[in-house]
Amino acid sequence: MINQAFLNDPYPAYRALRAEGLLHWSPEFCGGAWLLTGHADVAAVLRDPRFSVRRAGGWANSSGPGALAELREFKRIFSRSLLFVDAPQHTRLRQVMNAGFKPAALQRLAPQIQRIVDGLLDDVLAKAVGGTGPFAEFDFMRDFARPLPALVIAGMLGIGAADRSEFVAWSDDIAAFIGSPTPTLEIARRAQISLIAMNEYFRQLLPQRRAAPGDDLMSQLIRAEASGGIITTKELLAQCCTLLFAGHETTRNLLGNGMLALLQHPQQWQALQAEPSLLPAALKELLRFDSPVQYTGRRLKVAVEMHGQVMQKGDLVIPLIGAANRDPARFSDPDCLDIRRNEGAHLSFGYGPHVCIGATLTYLEAEIAMRSVMQRLPQLGLVGSTQSWGENAVYRSLNRLPLQFARPASALHAPPTKAHHA
Ligand code: HEM
């Protein structure tokens, strides 16, 4: 099922699967898995406690014989992550983490996010000055969508922007493993090395943060660790790695996939430019239309019957979020992008107890980013069809998105915004 054609456009494959039925056994997918395509089924599985999130060991196994023993450390670190623990451990960890994601705490980040966005766009504009021709070109992924979420999450965790390229590389190695339905042992080994490096990075920061805690997320976790041990040191480190990884592998793809979808649908793009107040609704629709996370996984704690088939205890189940978001039983004309669509919940942030903790932050960040791009890069457009899709089946991601905009006469710096003065 997963080949370059799927990576370029997975939606025909989802349609074909759906036409065959709502539940499929695939012997190849991650070494054997049940695939779910329907919105109602995906939502039901994601909130059903019989479907466990404990699957780090399963991945290790899927990389070949003997892999589990070799990937012991990968399993050990990630098996403490919020993403991969069930209740009651999950409930306890989620409570600790929620403190850092309260809407008021996130709103305080808005000026910081605006400054990062302005800085990146200043650079894009400065490079465009003095060139020839009425339009300037840049790579939206390299120059904007990739650095922005990495800088934002680094800021939230209180870590230096100078280390960004290092942790983005670690994160990409981990994502390559998680996002491969048939990972090789080599991909798995690289992911383990990077996860250990990331964990070690945070371990070395700990003494300094314990001595002088700030108001960053890592310090909040340290306070929780100190006040009665509701989180252990090993758990704390695993959550830092999870946040660093989850915070930018995803948001950059909302920006990239969303921008591409808008520019490929000029009427929608023009409607948004004419009425920027549509932006929050447009972001929801962009998340539905081309989900940055295409699927997740669960492992069965007990045998469960669905659509007349029995899934056995221990089986891997893959809720295909990307397919559920285009389910014609849930959304009218699902393959059509409509920024005014008002049909309720996409499943791009998951559902149930593990629903994305970063959803509000994502909307905040994406709104600031897209609004600023619209304001500062006039006559934005695609450069031919030179965009290229990456190899990751989970994190649907553009490698490159070359765009053009009207070349400015001089290096215009960010106009003062409310956020600048906040
Ligand atoms: C477009 C942006 C994003 C998308 C599409 C996205 C998607 C998701 C999805 C689908 C899940 C559920 C996974 C599952 O149930 O197996 C999830 C969970 C999670 N996300 Fe996000 N995410 C995004 C941004 C973020 C950001 C910005 C952060 C952190 C700063 C973040 C942190 C997390 C964490 C920690 C979890 C685990 C929650 C739990 O297990 O309780 N995500 N995300």
Image (tube, helix red, strand yellow):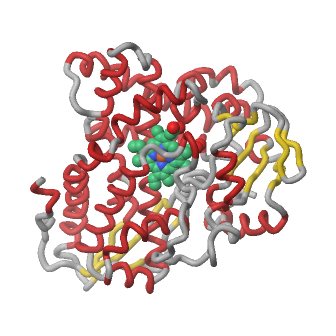
In front here: 111 or 352? 352
Say if 336 sits above or below 285 in the image: below
Say if 402 sits above or below 310 in the image: below
Residue 269 seen in the current view: yes
| Image point (23%, 72%), residue name | 376
In the rendered structure, the answer to whether residue 48 lies left or right of residue 218 reads: right
Say if 273 sits above or below 35 in the image: below
| Image point (49%, 32%), residue name | 194
In the rendered structure, the answer to whether residue 110 lies left or right of residue 381 reads: left
| Image point (31%, 28%), residue name | 220
Total marks in image: 0
In front here: 200 or 339? 339
Image location of residue 208, percent across then percent down: 24, 19
Image location of residue 379, percent across then percent down: 30, 82
In front here: 239 or 249? 239
Residue 176 seen in the current view: no
Image location of residue 156, percent across then percent down: 30, 39
Residue 314 appears in which quarter of the rendering?
A: top right
| Image point (44%, 86%), residue name | 267
Image location of residue 133, percent across then percent down: 26, 84
In the rendered structure, the answer to whether residue 128 lies left or right of residue 164 reads: left
Split into 4 quadrants, where in the image is the N terminus?
A: bottom right
Residue 11 appears in which quarter of the rendering?
A: bottom right
In the rendered structure, the answer to whether residue 199 lies left or right of residue 299 reads: left
